[in-house]
Amino acid sequence: MKFGIITHYDVHNHGAILQLNALKEFLATRNIDAQALQFDKNYDFMGVELKAKYNISIKSIGIYTRYLLEQGVAKTIFNYKKRKALNEFKTKHHLIGPFYSNTSDIDATVIGSDEVFALHTGPTPCLFGHACPGKIVFSYAGSFGPTNYADVEKYHCIPFVKSGLENMAGISVRDENSFNIVSHLLGKDPVRVCDPVLLYGYERERARFKKIERSPYLLIYAYDNRMNDKKEVDAIKAYARANHLELVSPGFYHSWCDHNVNVDPIELLNYFACATGIITDTFHGSIMSILTHGTFAVIPRDNSNKLLNLLAEYGLEDRVIPSLDDISMILSSPIDYDLVEEELQKRRTDSMSYLDSMIQLCK
């Protein structure tokens, strides 16, 4: 069988590509050939100027020129090489298929994972299953991300979102906020599943990991525009110095780190696996820490809904840094990964059961 995947495939983000590849690889264990289907994303809610940033055209020149002047040559070159590395990874693993409306041989369309139901950029019909190809359309680990029910109301998108969800053969979500929105809209509960990265586990790939030949390091995993506050940087640097650790940022550029490393998604996992400690403020940074049994600490941001929910699912609420003075306390506190793995296996079993039930509908 052939499945199409509707997700954020063309983003400058390792976590998004890692989850797409994980879903493709898991479906392959069920003898399903899957690829992400291309689509045009709606950016109407972002304003004309930011819309030009994502819809590349002559209007984008000013935005990217300003980026170069404001961010500097080193960061610009890093991000150019990062996009190149991610595109090469997608090509190597055959992740991207045709445009969704130009395919006729798809048995099912899977919506997700990632923030496929988020409305902060604009309403994109295929992200809610509208006009998607295949016998059935269903979601896997969909998330509304920063969008809450009040936002759906504010944008007058209740009929748009509800009709898409109602016509899906199955709905599964990965976080509490998304669970509540779907329950409110449809009057029935969706299935709770784990992110594809945790579902697939990358065991085969991790078995081939080799020790990274560099001094012991503290891994920093945060978007370029975050974790740059002077107080945060000073506190992290002080911890690293006190523990004789280099500061390494794989995948994102932070001028205050000792090393900024361009990697593909699998190489990124290897960096997590070899780190002495990890500080992150992202959802997939926490997932990669859990998967590699890392010693990690989390600074929650505007993503606290899904991030704190993830930590709570695996009994890891104590990884949140309540104060910058507590970095050392958090990173010196051991994690009982036997308990984490026990919980993860339960969630994997439930997630596999849901996916298998959707696959069965196509036969």
Image (cartoon, helix red, strand yellow):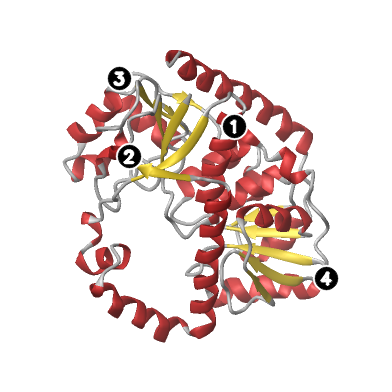
Sequence-first disc among 1 and 4: 1
The residue under label 3 is which amino acid type?
Gly
Give the residue drawn at x 69%, y 63%.
Answer: 219
**Residue assigned mark 4:** 215
Using the image, determine if residue 361 lies above or below residue 16.
above
Closest to the camera, between mark 3 and mark 4, is 4
User: Does 12 appear above or below 76?
Assistant: above
Q: Disc 1 versus disc 4: distance between alpha carbons? A: 35 Å
* Residue at horizontal 42 percent and vertical 82 percent from the top: 68
Quarter of the image for the C terminus: give it. Answer: top left
Q: CA–CA distance between discs 2 and 4? A: 46 Å
Q: Quadrant of residue 211?
A: bottom right
For residue 100, which numbered disc appears in the image?
2
Element on which disc 1 rests: helix
Q: Which element carries disc 2, helix, strand or loop?
A: helix
| Residue 187 marker | 3
Query: Counting other residues with Cα less than 10 Å from the Cα at mark 2, is it few (<14), some (14-19), or many (20 or more)?
Result: many
Location of mark 1 (residue): 26
- The answer, for residue 195, to whether it is visible in the render is no
Q: How many residues crowd mark 4 within 10 Å: few (<14), some (14–19), many (20+)?
A: few
Q: Nearer the viewer, mark 3 or mark 2?
A: 2
Mark 3 and mark 4 lie on one chain; the one further toward the N terminus is 3
Q: Secondary structure at mark 4?
A: loop
Instruction: Provide residue 4's location: percent of width, then percent of height.
Output: 42, 34
* Amino acid carrying mark 2 in the image: Tyr
Q: If you read the primary sequence from the N terminus, does the residue marked by circle 1 or circle 2 appear first?
A: 1
Who's the residue at 55% across and 29% down the image? Answer: 27
Q: Label 1 sits on what residue type?
A: Phe
